[in-house]
Image: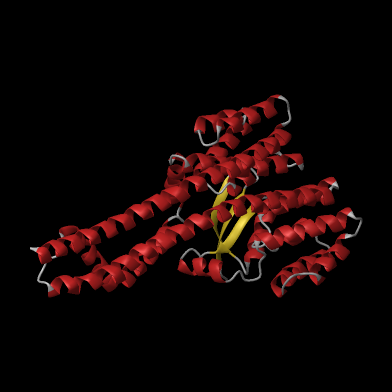
Amino acid sequence: MPLFRYTAISPAGTMDRGEMEAEDEAGVIRALQRAGSIPVKAVPAGTAGLGALLSLEFGRGESLSRTELTNATRELSIMLGAGQDIDRAMRFLVETAPNRRVSAVLTQVRDALRDGKPLAAALGQQPRSFPRLYIGLVRAGEAGGTLATTLDRLATLLERERSLASTVKSAMIYPALLLAAAIGSVVLLLTSVLPKFVPLFEQNGASLPRSTQLLVDMGDAVSAYGLWMLSALVLLGVAGWQGLQRPGPRLVADRWLLRIPVIGGLSKEVVAARFTRTLGTLLTNGVPLIAALGIVAEAVGNLAATAAIEAASGSAKGGAGLSGPLAAARIMPLRTIYLLRLGEETAQLGPMALRAAEIHEEKTRLGIGRLVSLLVPVITIVMGAVVAAIVSSLLMAMLSLNDLASG
C-alpha cells in the first residue's frame, strides 16, 4: 500500500506528524479519527518536490479551489437557511456546479450523505477540498443544531480571506508590471541600442570611454548568456521553493519576513488578521479554545507565528492566559494583544477576536495601499536613473568622438 504523510491533533491536544500506509488519503483520515485524533492533512509521501509544484500550478485533480469552496459554502448556507433539507441542497449544488471537477467532488459528498454519514464525515473524505478548519466548524454546527448559521459564518470567513488575498495580489500587479518594463527597457538599451555605436568608433580608430565600454560589455554578456542566466534564476527559484518546504529554512525565512522594515509590519498585520478571524470564528461556533488554537496554528501561514501559537496553547492548557505568551513572542501587533487580553478579562474572547480581525484587515488594506504608493515612484526613479546613466554614457562617447574629429 502507498505511504502517506499526515498531520493531526492528538487527543491530548498536541500536534503529531508521521507516516502511515493506507489505500488512499481517506483511509488515513479514518484511521486517525478512530484513534481519537483530529486530522489536519494527509498527502502522499513523495509529493514534496518539483512534481508537487507543477501539480499545484497546472492541475488540481478532483479538488476545489478556494473560490469554488467559498461559492459552494455560501450557496449551501442560503439553501439551508431557506429551509431546504441537506439532500436537496446538495443536489442543487451538484446541478449548478460550474464544471465537472466541482460536480464530481460535490457528488461524492452527496453520496456519502445518502449513505447515512453526517456532513462533517462526508466532507472529511475529501481532505484536499475541505480544510480541517472547515470540517471542524461544520461538525460543531451539526452538534449544536446550527448548521445553516455556521455555514453562513464559514462563508463569511472564506470571503474575508479571499478578499484579503485578492487585495494583496491585485496591489502587486502594477509594481510587478512596472518592474518588468524597467528591466526590459534596460536590456533593450544594452543589447540593441549601444552595440550600434561600436562600429562608428571602430571606423574612426577611437576607443570607447571606459563607462561606455563597460555597458557594451554588459550588453554582450546579456546577449550571449541571457538565456543561461534566466535558466539559472529559474532553477534557483525552484531550489529555494523546495528548501522552504522544510521546517528549518521555512522558520528562518518566516522570522526574517516579520523583521523587515515596512514589509515586516505589514506581514504582522496579515498574520494577525488570519489568526484573529479564524480564532474568533471557531470560538463563536462553540469550538473549545485548545482545539481552536490547534486549528489556528495550521491556518496562519507563518511558522514563526505557528510556534508562538503552539506555545500559547501550552500555556492555556495550564490555566494561564492566551495574551501573555503571544506578547512575549512579539509576533502579533500590540493591538492584537490588548484586544485579546480584554476579551479574556470580559469572557468575550471570540467576539473581541473578530473585532480585532476587522481592524487588522483594514490596516492591511491601508498598509498595502501605502506600500504600492511607495513602490511605484521608487521603481520609476530607479528606472529613470539607470536609463539616464546609459544615455549619459552614450553622450560622453559621442562627445569624445566629436573632440577627436575636431582635433
Q: Quadrant of the N terminus?
A: bottom right
Q: Quadrant of the C terminus?
A: bottom left
Q: Residue furthest left?
A: 407
Residue closer to the observer: 406 or 283? 406
Residue at the image position 48 percent from the left and 43 percent from the top: 263
Q: Position of residue 92 (x, y in %)?
A: 84, 67
Whether residue 184 sits left or right of residue 91 in the image: it is left
Q: Coloring scheme of the render?
A: secondary structure
Q: Position of residue 285 (x, y in %)?
A: 76, 43
Whether residue 396 sits left or right of residue 112 in the image: it is left
Residue at the image position 67 percent from the left and 42 percent from the top: 277
Residue closer to the observer: 331 or 26? 331
Residue closer to the observer: 312 or 333? 333
The answer to whether 140 is drawn above or below residue 187 in the figure is: above
Could you tell me how many numbered marks the image carries?
0
Whether residue 339 sits left or right of residue 215 in the image: it is right
The answer to whether 60 is drawn above or below residue 5 in the figure is: below
Q: Is residue 13 visible?
A: no
Q: Residue furthest front?
A: 406
Q: Position of residue 334 (x, y in %)?
A: 56, 30
Q: Position of residue 283 (x, y in %)?
A: 72, 39
Q: Residue furthest top?
A: 345
Q: Is residue 330 visible?
A: yes
Whether residue 370 sits left or right of residue 342 in the image: it is left
Residue at the image position 11 percent from the left and 66 percent from the top: 405
